[in-house]
Amino acid sequence: MTDILLEIRNLHVSADGLPVLHGVDFTIPIGETHVLFGPNGSGKSSLLATIMGLVPYRVTSGEIWFKGRRIDALSVDQRAQMGLGMSFQRPPALEGVTVEAFTAAIGSTALLETEALALDFSGFAERDVNVGFSGGEIKRWEILKLFLKRPDLCLFDEPESGVDLEHIAAVGKAIDRLLGADTPADPQRTALVITHTGFILDYIHADVGHLMVDGRIVGAGDPRTLFSHIKAHGYSLPPAGADIQQAI
Ligand SMILES: Nc1ncnc2c1ncn2[C@@H]1O[C@H](COP(=O)(O)OP(=O)(O)OP(=O)(O)O)[C@@H](O)[C@H]1O
């Protein structure tokens, strides 16, 4: 069996007729956490949404492979059933669907209380999902939702944005715990994380960082080396070397 969980091959994507990704290539081996950096509008969220199969993103050419199966023609449901899950940057409010009902629908009621406690999210069970939630509460619910579902590949779209400094620690630790191997029966999970602030790097073990510019991955390497360079010099690659490789 291959040790590659996700493979993206020369992916071109349009959203409502507008080209947003222009030939993305990368792979994520099983159990690794990869981080995606890039300026506003470079295509990071579009890439995650395309992997998840969300509208209005349409693959115009290229391929997405997950667990050795080509998935770019599958529905969101089918991809979720296969083990893909995503925490959204701006998830919709679900009027009439309580947190408790949502949790029951994904079959994880038993876990809700303890995991909510860890994320300081107690007292939300009776509330409608995302209705009137603050920005930070929305983010904590997004992480909790993944915790309850435990997908094999977790896609995080800016999990720390809008979260206050105290709760960033709770979010970071929860993500680390979600991805970590708690027991032999619960293997190391695989993840792709978008971050602007880099706060999340203080809490998770990230294996590889990718830099996305203008709808393409332009290079990859050690996530901390890449992030330090971006902080000092903007969205460019440091000189190619052992830590960083430019895309060809
Ligand atoms: N549904 C859509 N319709 C039209 N244009 C879109 C759509 N989704 C994304 N785009 C455009 O595609 C480009 C990439 O957007 P995307 O949200 O993927 O960038 P991003 O790198 O995640 O940005 P940010 O860091 O600001 O979140 C932007 O120019 C955006 O306006």
Image (cartoon, rainbow, N blue to C red):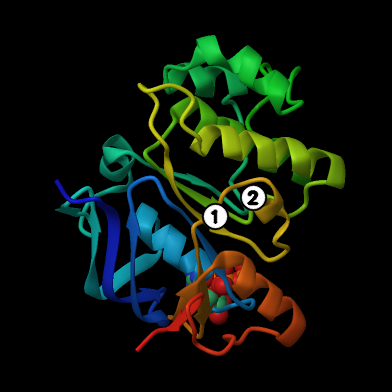
Look at the image and tell me in which quarter the C terminus lies: bottom left
User: Which residue does the numbered mark 2 point to in the structure image?
Assistant: 159
Q: CA distance from mark 2 to mark 1?
A: 14 Å
Look at the image and tell me in which quarter the N terminus lies: top left
In the image, residue 130 sits, relative to residue 15, either above or below, namely: above
Q: Note whether residue 130 is visible.
A: no
Residue 181: x and y, percent? 46, 31
Characterize the local packing of mark 1: few (<14), some (14-19) or many (20 or more) Cα atoms within 10 angstroms: many
Residue 57: x and y, percent? 38, 66
Mark 2 vs mark 1: in front: 1
Q: Quadrant of residue 170?
A: top right
User: Which residue does the numbered mark 1 point to in the structure image?
Assistant: 206
At 59% from the left edge and 39% from the top edge, which residue is drawn? Answer: 176
Relative to the observer, which residue lies in front, 155 or 176? 176
Residue 150: x and y, percent? 44, 31
Q: Note whether residue 189 is visible.
A: yes
